[in-house]
Image (cartoon, rainbow, N blue to C red):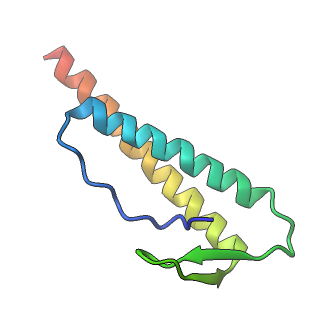
Amino acid sequence: MEGPAREARPEDGAGPAAGREDLSSRIKEQKIVVDELSNLKKNRKVYRQQQNSNIFFLADRTEMLSESKNLLDELKREYQEMENSEKTKIKK
Protein backbone atom coordinates (compact mmCIF):
# COMPACT_ATOMS: atom_id res chain seq x y z
CA MET A 1 0.00 0.00 0.00
CA GLU A 2 1.33 3.38 -0.91
CA GLY A 3 1.87 5.78 1.97
CA PRO A 4 -0.18 8.93 2.34
CA ALA A 5 2.80 11.26 2.23
CA ARG A 6 3.02 11.56 -1.52
CA GLU A 7 4.96 14.06 -3.51
CA ALA A 8 2.78 16.74 -5.08
CA ARG A 9 2.28 16.16 -8.78
CA PRO A 10 3.27 19.02 -11.06
CA GLU A 11 0.57 20.59 -13.21
CA ASP A 12 0.74 19.64 -16.87
CA GLY A 13 -0.07 23.20 -17.87
CA ALA A 14 -3.34 22.08 -19.47
CA GLY A 15 -5.31 24.61 -17.45
CA PRO A 16 -7.45 24.56 -14.33
CA ALA A 17 -9.74 21.80 -15.60
CA ALA A 18 -6.83 19.34 -15.78
CA GLY A 19 -5.64 20.40 -12.33
CA ARG A 20 -9.11 19.94 -10.90
CA GLU A 21 -9.44 16.46 -12.47
CA ASP A 22 -6.05 15.46 -11.09
CA LEU A 23 -6.98 16.75 -7.65
CA SER A 24 -10.32 14.97 -7.81
CA SER A 25 -8.65 11.66 -8.65
CA ARG A 26 -6.14 12.15 -5.82
CA ILE A 27 -9.03 12.79 -3.40
CA LYS A 28 -10.76 9.57 -4.53
CA GLU A 29 -7.49 7.67 -4.14
CA GLN A 30 -6.93 9.09 -0.66
CA LYS A 31 -10.50 8.22 0.41
CA ILE A 32 -9.77 4.62 -0.51
CA VAL A 33 -6.53 4.65 1.51
CA VAL A 34 -8.36 6.04 4.57
CA ASP A 35 -11.16 3.49 4.17
CA GLU A 36 -8.72 0.59 3.84
CA LEU A 37 -6.70 1.67 6.88
CA SER A 38 -9.89 2.21 8.91
CA ASN A 39 -11.12 -1.31 8.19
CA LEU A 40 -7.90 -3.14 9.06
CA LYS A 41 -7.86 -5.40 12.09
CA LYS A 42 -5.81 -4.06 14.99
CA ASN A 43 -3.10 -6.73 14.65
CA ARG A 44 -2.46 -6.18 10.92
CA LYS A 45 0.85 -4.75 9.78
CA VAL A 46 1.08 -1.67 7.61
CA TYR A 47 4.05 -0.74 5.47
CA ARG A 48 5.04 2.62 4.05
CA GLN A 49 6.83 2.82 0.72
CA GLN A 50 10.03 4.82 0.67
CA GLN A 51 9.68 7.70 -1.80
CA ASN A 52 11.07 6.99 -5.27
CA SER A 53 12.00 3.44 -4.37
CA ASN A 54 10.67 -0.08 -3.99
CA ILE A 55 11.64 -0.30 -0.32
CA PHE A 56 8.91 -0.65 2.32
CA PHE A 57 9.18 0.05 6.04
CA LEU A 58 6.92 -1.12 8.84
CA ALA A 59 4.69 1.76 10.02
CA ASP A 60 2.22 2.34 12.82
CA ARG A 61 -1.36 1.78 11.59
CA THR A 62 -2.93 4.55 13.68
CA GLU A 63 -0.24 7.02 12.67
CA MET A 64 -0.71 6.16 8.99
CA LEU A 65 -4.48 6.54 9.35
CA SER A 66 -4.07 9.93 10.99
CA GLU A 67 -1.66 11.13 8.29
CA SER A 68 -3.97 9.84 5.56
CA LYS A 69 -6.95 11.69 7.03
CA ASN A 70 -4.91 14.89 7.30
CA LEU A 71 -3.79 14.59 3.68
CA LEU A 72 -7.39 13.96 2.58
CA ASP A 73 -8.51 17.09 4.44
CA GLU A 74 -5.75 19.13 2.77
CA LEU A 75 -6.72 17.84 -0.68
CA LYS A 76 -10.39 18.63 -0.06
CA ARG A 77 -9.49 22.13 1.14
CA GLU A 78 -7.30 22.69 -1.94
CA TYR A 79 -10.11 21.47 -4.21
CA GLN A 80 -12.62 23.77 -2.51
CA GLU A 81 -10.26 26.74 -2.88
CA MET A 82 -9.87 25.93 -6.56
CA GLU A 83 -13.65 25.76 -6.99
CA ASN A 84 -14.13 29.07 -5.14
CA SER A 85 -11.45 30.86 -7.17
CA GLU A 86 -13.04 29.69 -10.43
CA LYS A 87 -16.47 30.91 -9.28
CA THR A 88 -14.93 34.28 -8.40
CA LYS A 89 -13.36 34.53 -11.88
CA ILE A 90 -16.70 33.74 -13.54
CA LYS A 91 -18.48 36.48 -11.54
CA LYS A 92 -16.01 39.16 -12.69
Where residue 59 sits, quadrant-wise, is: bottom right
Q: Is residue 42 left or right of residue 17?
A: right
- Residue at image location 24% in from the left, 33% down from the top: 16
- Residue at image location 20% in from the left, 17% down from the top: 90
- Residue at image location 64% in from the left, 48% down from the top: 32
Where residue 23 sits, quadrant-wise, is: top left
- Residue at image location 57% in from the left, 61% down from the top: 68
Residue toward you, 61 or 77: 61
Farthest-out residue, top: 91
Q: Is residue 16 above or below residue 92?
A: below
Percent x, y of residue 42:
85, 71
How many dots with numbers? 0
Q: Is residue 18 left or right of residue 43?
A: left
Farthest-out residue, left: 92
| Location of the C terminus (image quadrant) | top left
Q: Is residue 35 left or right of residue 87?
A: right
Q: Is residue 74 above or below residue 84?
A: below
Percent x, y of residue 71:
49, 58
| Location of the N terminus (image quadrant) | bottom right
Q: Is residue 52 above or below residue 26?
A: below
Q: Is residue 27 above or below residue 68?
A: above
Q: Is residue 85 left or right of residue 68?
A: left
Percent x, y of residue 73:
50, 51
Where residue 84 sits, quadrant-wise, is: top left
